[in-house]
Amino acid sequence: MSGLIIARSGALQGALAAMPRFAYLGTMEPVAPSAFETLIWVGTAVSLAGLAGLLFVIFRVSRAKRSGLGDDAMREVIRKAIPLNLGALFLSVIGLMLVIVGVFLA
């Protein structure tokens, strides 16, 4: 079914390209993404990695809280989770900065 749709749109594109007003449609070729579009996608990936890290820390600490650990053990779990949390936040912020810079410069 999708082949039929593509064939029809190709025929329509050819018919429109023959008209002077729609001549730009005849030269539609795939274009390599620019460096800024790549920057946007890289920023998105970095931001999603940071989000995954945040979710990992949230689930890790909530699992420890539900297990009913003592005060010292809970402090130890939280002490180990803080650097992971800050690293994940850092990744998220850097990723969002990359996306914003890519959007502004694209």
Image: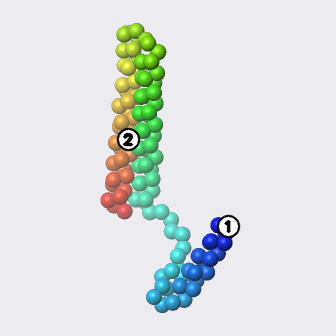
Q: Secondary structure at mark 2?
A: helix
Residue at left 51%, top 68%?
Answer: 31
Viewer-proximal residue, 98 or 63?
Answer: 63
Q: Which residue is identified by label 2?
A: 92
Q: Amino acid at mark 2?
A: Ser
Residue at left 41%, top 44%?
Answer: 47
Q: Position of residue 43 (x, y in %)?
A: 41, 49
Mark earlier in primary sequence (2, 1): 1
When the figure is inspected, residue 103 is found, relative to residue 43, above or below; the finding is below
Quarter of the image with the C terminus is bottom left
Q: Amino acid at mark 1?
A: Met
4 vs 21, left or right, is right
- Crowding at dot 1, Cα within 10 Å, few <14 / some 14-19 / many 20+, comes out as few
When the figure is inspected, residue 61 is found, relative to residue 69, above or below; the finding is below
Query: Which-is-in-front pick, marks 2 and 1?
Result: 1
Q: Position of residue 104 (x, y in %)?
A: 32, 59
Q: Which residue is identified by label 1?
A: 1
Q: Position of residue 81 (x, y in %)?
A: 40, 24
